[in-house]
Image (cartoon, rainbow, N blue to C red):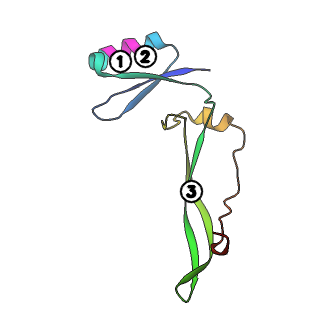
Amino acid sequence: MKQWYIRIPEDGKVHGPYDTESDASDDAYRMKGLDAEIFSKGEPAMVCKITHGYVNQKFEGGVCVEQSFTAGDPVEFEDEDSNPLLDRDAIESLPTLYHTFDMIQPGRL
């Protein structure tokens, strides 16, 4: 289901969701006149999953010999336009999104 949101350019705050573009437009005009940006979100075709964590690197004689990524929390999601996915229900309805964090080892670069 597509939902509509309002972004206020001055402070970047996002308001919504609204069920129709008309509802979002009416509220945007009341809040900021024509300066508000109205955008929609539904189930995005492309999702960017951002996992925070850290990289472990081992060095011998000043040369990196091994590296690995350790994933942590939180995980964030963005759509194809780099807008954060704000609707928790929409995020939870996504299929399980997992791919290994294997890194190219130094000897293979």
Q: Residue at x 70, y 57 (%)?
A: 100
Q: Position of residue 6 (x, y in %)?
A: 40, 24
Residue 83 picture location, percent across and down: 48, 35
The earlier-in-sequence mark between 2 and 3 is: 2
Quarter of the image where the C terminus is located: bottom right
> As displayed, is residue 67 above or below residue 96?
below
Image disc number at residue 24: 2
Q: Which residue is mark 3?
A: 73
Residue 28 bears which disc, if any? 1
Q: Secondary structure at mark 3?
A: strand
Residue 28 falls inside the magenta stretch: yes
Give the residue displayed 55% in from the left and 35% down from the top.
79
The magenta region covers 24-29
Tags 1 and 2 touching, CB below 8 Å: yes
Q: Nearer the viewer, residue 59 or 93?
A: 59
Instruction: Quadrant for residue 101, please give it.
Output: bottom right
Q: Is residue 55 above or below residue 33?
A: below
Q: Nearer the viewer, residue 81 or 8?
A: 81
